[in-house]
Image (cartoon, rainbow, N blue to C red):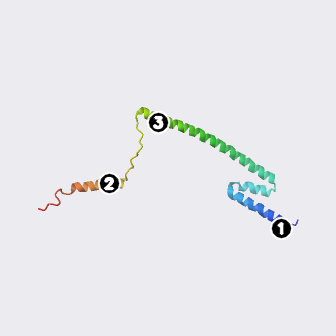
Amino acid sequence: MMMNRKDVEAYQKSYEEIDVFLKQFPHLKNTVLEGLRGKSGKNLFSKLNEHSKDLGLKQERIARQHDSLMEEFTELKYLKNNMDDYLGREQRTEKNPRKSILKQIKEIGKEDQERKLPKNRGIER
C-alpha cells in the first residue's frame, strides 16, 4: 500500500495529538498503547469513556461529601460561638504576638545587669 503525502501528514498529525494527550494524561498511557496495538479505535475510545465516567462519578461523590462537611462545619462553628457567649468567654480580636525566647532571655539579662550595677556609678569617692 502506497501512502501519499496527505496520508503521511494525517498520520503525523494524529500521533502528535496522541502525544499531547499522553502528556496531559500520563496515567492513561497503557490504555492508549493497548488500543493502538490492537488497531481498534472503538475499544480505545470505549475504555477512555468508561474511565471518564468513573472519574465523573468520583468527582460527584467528593463534591457531595464536601458540601455535607461544609454544612457540618458551619453548624459546629455556630454552636461554638453560642457556647462561648453562654460561658462568657471573650473573643480576642487582638492576639498578642509571642516574643521569641531569645528576645525574652536578652531582656531578662539586661534587667539583671542593671540590678547588679552599683547605684552610685557616677559618684567618685
Between disc 3 and disc 2, whose residue precedes?
3
The picture places residue 21, in percent across and down from the top left corner, at 71, 57
The numbered disc on residue 105 is: 2
Residue located 78% across and 55% down the image: 35
In the displayed orientation, state which residue is furthest to the top: 86
The numbered disc on residue 23 is: none
**Distance (Cα) linking label 3 and label 2:** 37 Å
Location of residue 41 by image quarter: bottom right
Between disc 2 and disc 1, whose residue precedes?
1
**Distance (Cα) linking label 1 and label 3:** 73 Å
**Distance (Cα) linking label 2 and label 1:** 81 Å
The picture places residue 23, in percent across and down from the top left corner, at 68, 59
* Kind of residue sitting beneath label 3: Asn
Q: Is residue 14 above or below residue 96?
A: below
The numbered disc on residue 5 is: 1
The residue that disc 3 covers is: 81
The picture places residue 8, in percent across and down from the top left corner, at 81, 65
Q: Is residue 120 above or below residue 2?
A: above
In the image shown, does 13 or 57 lie closer to the viewer? 13
